[in-house]
Image (cartoon, rainbow, N blue to C red):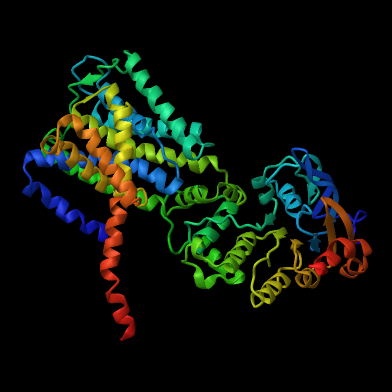
């Protein structure tokens, strides 16, 4: 297991004893997770395992009921999402809440301007604005350059997913949390997504929730498996493939359909 | 550019219309349109329906009355070049404060909160004599003379209202293309997501309300010059509902709709006497509103552009087959 406690540089993400309770129900409980800088980690688990709940707690979309979260050595457990974003944390959402009335260009512009803290300007945007050029570059990377002037409400599901990734890549992310980026993509779009994930700079840490085993195992060097809100197993893709518990609850279950 | 072309007939209007039409219909429509624009702006770009626009307009109107010539002997006379910026500033500040109070509310709750503020302001003006002169308010408010030109005369007041209306529309279309304006629209679509871009949600909401306060304040200043008086009735439930009706008739999806709605409203208001009994105006406007909501939920502006699109469409396939 790639743990790095003795090393001087802080871990990208360190989670200790995280739990999230909704009423009487623990969505996740007693989660420990350590992700090194530059690591590619997949989080697997059947539906309802608590993967997205864990992400929500990590980003600050919801607050943790118990436990501690550390980003690059700094405790962020009590920080709101916009502060964590400024530390280089980014995420995509499984059910994309995009700005339906804005174009792809304007959406990516806001991602750039938001992170640069330059969104308070009241004068109309000029076509020559450097931030617009940057948003076009992001659209190029994410594969939505051909729909720059389309409103996001008119995008296909796959394009929305790609736009999500474009938003997450704005302003040099240090750690990316991708929530099932391949869900709902066509078989033709999946390899493109894999290629995009593989092409990310090596120093970017990626934590990926993925149902698609192929994408997960192809793009990740280590895997954590969640089951019923708890960590079931951690290890290399090979370890996970051989793990009997994992086979029983996840792989076995998936084949059982 | 295209918008600027619509100014041409509006500039010719004074040569065609007599003073009654110019003042009672054209100028009044422009002023009500500016006030309704302040609501359409909020509804279209922030997605919030505010019932407090009459309060923001009233803040500006009362400031002009208090610091200008009036016949009730209350207030301090200041030159217009001091009182006008002061009135606009107070309208912007009151807009921002209302935004701050209503910032966590959406939908019906935003309506309730802004309505509560509007009604509270109405009762406050009725009970405060030192600043608002109770329910009688101010009368004999005179529009200033600028460079020998009295803004009380029909033509200068019309041209000023037209200029302010054009400026207000230009400001709106420029502002919504600014980074802050885009942020406001993003808050409308997905506030949680705006936070996830490292942007605070409060600032865009307060800014949107403050900007709507600027528009409402401009309308409020013109209105007090036009009416030459202001009282609690200028900020009560009547004007609150009128502004809403105008916005809905014109359509909340395009800023220009506010002026279309205002013209229809003023024509109905002015000529309801001839059509039906004067006391039945509310019935008439209610029926019109009902028809709009059923037949054209996007308002008259939307209805018109849909018709234009339908007229153009038959040509399009022909081109593509050639």
Q: Residue at x 90, y 57 (%)?
A: A4
Quarter of the image for the N terminus of chain B: give it: bottom left
Looking at the picture, how far across and down is residue B261, in whole percent? 26, 45
Which residue, as the protein is rendered here, is positioned at the far bottom? B322
> From where the camera sits, is residue A222 visible?
no
Looking at the picture, how far across and down is residue A79, in whole percent? 71, 42
Looking at the picture, how far across and down is residue A101, in whole percent? 47, 56
Left or right? Give the position of A180 relative to B30.
Answer: right
Left or right? Give the position of B252 relative to A61.
Answer: left
Quarter of the image for the C terminus of chain B: give it: bottom left
B206 relative to B76, above or below: below
- A59 or A86: nearer the eye? A59
Looking at the picture, how far across and down is residue B124, in whole percent? 37, 18
B123 relative to B240, above or below: above
Which quadrant of the view contains residue A77? top right
A12 relative to B60, above or below: below
- A122 or A67: nearer the eye? A67
- B74 or A34: nearer the eye? A34
Counting the numbered discs, the total is 0
Q: Residue at x 82, y 69 (%)?
A: A255
Q: Residue at x 54, y 64 (%)?
A: A135
């Amino acid at each position: 297991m790639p743990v790095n406690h003795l090393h001087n540089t802080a871990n990208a993400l360190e989670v200790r004893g995280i739990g999230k309770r909704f009423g009487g129900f623990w969505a996740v409980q007693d989660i420990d997770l350590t992700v090194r800088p530059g690591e590619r980690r997949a989080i697997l688990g059947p539906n309802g395992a608590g993967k997205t709940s864990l992400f929500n707690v990590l980003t600050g979309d919801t607050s943790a009921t118990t436990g501690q979260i550390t980003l690059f050595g700094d405790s962020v457990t009590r920080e709101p999402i916009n502060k964590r974003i400024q530390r280089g944390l980014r995420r995509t959402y499984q059910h994309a809440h995009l700005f339906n009335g804005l174009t792809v260009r304007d959406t990516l512009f806001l991602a750039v301007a938001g992170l640069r803290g330059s969104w308070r300007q009241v004068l109309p945007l000029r076509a020559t604005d450097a931030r617009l050029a940057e948003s076009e570059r992001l659209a190029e990377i994410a594969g939505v350059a051909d729909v720059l002037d389309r409103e996001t409400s008119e995008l296909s599901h796959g394009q929305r997913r790609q736009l999500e990734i474009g938003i997450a890549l704005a302003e040099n992310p240090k750690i990316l949390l991708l929530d099932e980026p391949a869900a709902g993509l066509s078989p033709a779009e999946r390899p493109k997504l894999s290629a995009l994930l593989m092409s990310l700079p090596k120093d970017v840490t990626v934590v990926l929730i993925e149902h698609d085993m192929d994408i997960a195992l192809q793009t990740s060097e280590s895997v954590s498996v969640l089951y019923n809100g708890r960590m079931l197993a951690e290890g290399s893709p090979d370890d996970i493939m051989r793990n009997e518990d994992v086979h029983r609850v996840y792989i076995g279950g998936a084949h059982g359909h | 550019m295209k918008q600027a072309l619509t100014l041409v007939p509006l500039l010719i209007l004074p040569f065609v219309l007599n003073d009654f039409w110019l003042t009672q219909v054209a100028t009044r429509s422009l002023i009500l349109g500016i006030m309704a624009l302040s609501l359409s702006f909020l509804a279209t770009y922030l997605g919030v329906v505010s019932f407090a626009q009459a309060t923001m307009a009233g803040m500006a109107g009362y400031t002009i009355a208090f610091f200008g010539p009036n016949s009730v002997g209350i207030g301090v006379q200041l030159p217009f070049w001091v009182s006008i910026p002061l009135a606009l500033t107070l309208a912007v500040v009151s807009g921002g404060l209302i935004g701050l109070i209503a910032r966590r509310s959406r939908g019906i709750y935003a309506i309730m909160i802004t309505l509560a503020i509007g009604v509270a302001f109405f009762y406050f003006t009725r009970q405060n004599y030192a600043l608002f002169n109770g329910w009688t308010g101010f009368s004999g408010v005179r529009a200033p003379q600028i460079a020998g030109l009295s803004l009380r005369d029909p033509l200068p007041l019309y041209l000023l209202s037209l200029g302010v209306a054009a400026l207000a529309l230009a400001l709106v279309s420029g502002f919504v293309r600014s980074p802050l304006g885009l942020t406001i629209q993003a808050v409308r679509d997905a506030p949680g997501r705006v936070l996830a871009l490292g942007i605070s949600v409060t600032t865009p909401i307060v800014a949107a309300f403050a900007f709507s306060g600027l528009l409402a304040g401009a309308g409020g200043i013109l209105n007090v010059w036009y009416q030459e008086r202001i009282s609690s009735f200028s900020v009560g439930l009547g004007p609150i509902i009128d502004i809403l009706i105008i916005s809905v008739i014109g359509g909340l999806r395009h800023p220009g709709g506010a002026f279309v709605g205002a013209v229809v409203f003023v024509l109905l208001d002015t000529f309801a006497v001839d059509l039906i009994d004067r006391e039945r105006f509310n019935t008439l406007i209610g029926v019109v509103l009902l028809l709009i909501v059923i037949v054209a939920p996007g308002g008259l502006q939307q209805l018109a552009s849909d018709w234009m699109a339908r007229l153009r469409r038959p040509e399009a396939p022909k081109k593509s087959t050639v």
